[in-house]
Structure formats: C-alpha cells, structure tokens
Amino acid sequence: MTIVKKSGLAPGLHFVATPIGNARDITLRALDVLASADVLAAEDTRALRRLMEIHGLSPQDRPLLSYHEHNAARIRPKLLAEMAAGRSVAYASEAGTPMISDPGFDLLRAAQEAGFAATTVPGPSAVIAALTLAGLPTDRFLFAGFLPNATGARKKALAGLADVMATLVFYESPRRLGAMLTDAAEVLGGDREAAVCREITKKFEECQRGALSELAARYLQLSVKGEIVVLLGKGRLEKISEMDLEHSVRTALETMSVRDVADTLSARFGIKRRQVYQLAMALKEKDD
C-alpha cells in the first residue's frame, strides 16, 4: 500500500519539549511540529491534548498514541511502523524535555537503530530551570534523577556521589522530601549548601535555600505538594582529626551498618575506606 504523506514535516522521530508548568513556555517551533506531524505520541495524551487546545491546535484525524513506561514495549513497534511508512512522529513527555526521566530513551534508540532520522525541538527543562533559581554553582553539575525510595539504598546512592565536585540535582517526591534531605545531611554533611525548588513556573513557585540540615528540619515538619527539584552545592573534602573521625564513626553506627559507615565517611572525608571500616569494626566490637 502506498502511503501519501500529509504534512511537510520530515519523516522520522521528532522529540518535542513541552512546558513544565506555564503553558506559554512553549516554542513556536514546537507548535509548528505539533500542528504538522502525521502521528502524535505522548507520555500523557490528556496533558498533550490540553496543551494543544490552549494554543488552538487539534489532533483532528491524526493518531494520538499513549507511550509510557508501562506500554512502551507494545507501542514502540507501532511508532516505528509509522516511520517506516514515511510518516513523521512527534513525541512529547508529560512535561519538560523528552529523554530527561521519561521513557523516550528506548524509542530514540530503536528509531536510530532502524535508520530513521531523529531530531529534537528543545525547550523547558525542570533541571535547567531549577539551576537558574537555586543560586548554586552552575559551571559543573550532575543530574542524578530520582534517588531510591528505601533509606538504606538512598544513603548508599548518596555516598556514591559524595566525592563529585559538582552541584547535584535530583527530582524528588513531596512525600519523601523530608526523609531524602535528612539522609543527604547525614551522608554529605549538614552544612552543605542546598536548595529546594517547587512548582517552577506555576502559581505557587518557590525556591527555599539554606544549609542542608536546615532544609531537612523544615521539610520534615512541612507537608508540601507539587513537582520538586532538590539541588546540593558542590562537595568539598574535609580534613578530619582521629578524634573527630572516631566521633563521626560512633554517631554513624547508631543508624548505619559498618559497611555503610565505611562507604559514607570515606567518601565524605576523602580517606581510605579500609581505614574507616577497620575503625568501625573495632568500635562496634568494643561497644558490643
């Protein structure tokens, strides 16, 4: 069957960045692509429909397919088939730039491996927006996505980032915000500069800055809603005396295993893990 292409948009995959809050934060090119693509795909089709309606666009008779982490394996072949037929496919994440904490990665890889053209229509990103608000160094940063839900796994992940000399950026759930900040203060040091950005570009936008311990205390007591980005300022290796190291190890052993104490404190103070592990074992045996 011969496919007659309807739009003037080049065949292949087009990633479209959408607003993270304010619907007016969309580019003219994004509107052009959404208006002319042969096939529309979205992490949340309802969100894309609302956005298009606000800007006077309609899917009309074009396919609008839901593509998210739970159905990606089933829908991906359909989108690849559309590209194989010479059609243009526009994919939009629920909010922000596709590929940043959304299921677009596998779609891009599959399209590229099949030889289809792929392009991006850049625009809003919560990571970049938060960096512009936080007042923390931006010359070097690391986006680490969502941390694990469980406390032990979260502390281990944070310990692995302790020696990264860059601003750390995380997405976080409102329900876990206080616990995440508390774990970060324990693992990375309570005096580390930090910021919590919430509801960026929306009506109740706010950005709270302060020492990590201060923010942890604040959000353990405060119930919040909305989309949240947590930023931690650049780490620094601390010089520590034997007496202070022993105190730190004793304190950490109250809530952590010997292995986690070794991982956490060796990264924080820039000393050999074996040294911390042996000290922790000795103190634990002595206390027991």
Image: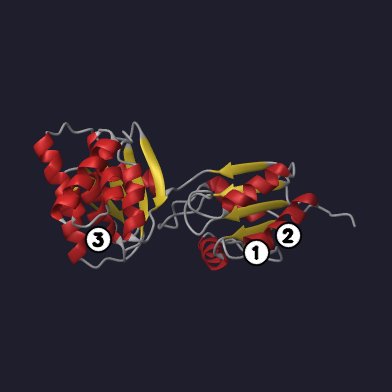
For mark 1, what is the residue?
65
Which residue is tagged 3? 178
Left or right: where 7 falls relative to 72:
right
Kindly identify the amino acid type of the residue bearing the numbered disc 3: Gly
Q: Distance between the residues labelled 3 and 1?
A: 37 Å
Between marks 3 and 2 in the image, the one whose residue lies nearer the viewer: 3
- Tell me: 106 left or right of 282: right
Residue 146 at x, y percent in the picture: 40, 54
Q: Residue 137 carries which label?
A: none
Mark 1 or 2: in front is 2
Q: Is residue 1 left or right of residue 235?
A: right
- Amino acid type of disc 1? Leu
Q: Mark 2 points at which residue?
A: 78
Mark 3 or mark 2, earlier in chain: 2
Position in image of residue 59 (x %, y %): 64, 63
Q: Is residue 86 visible in the rendered structure shown here?
A: no
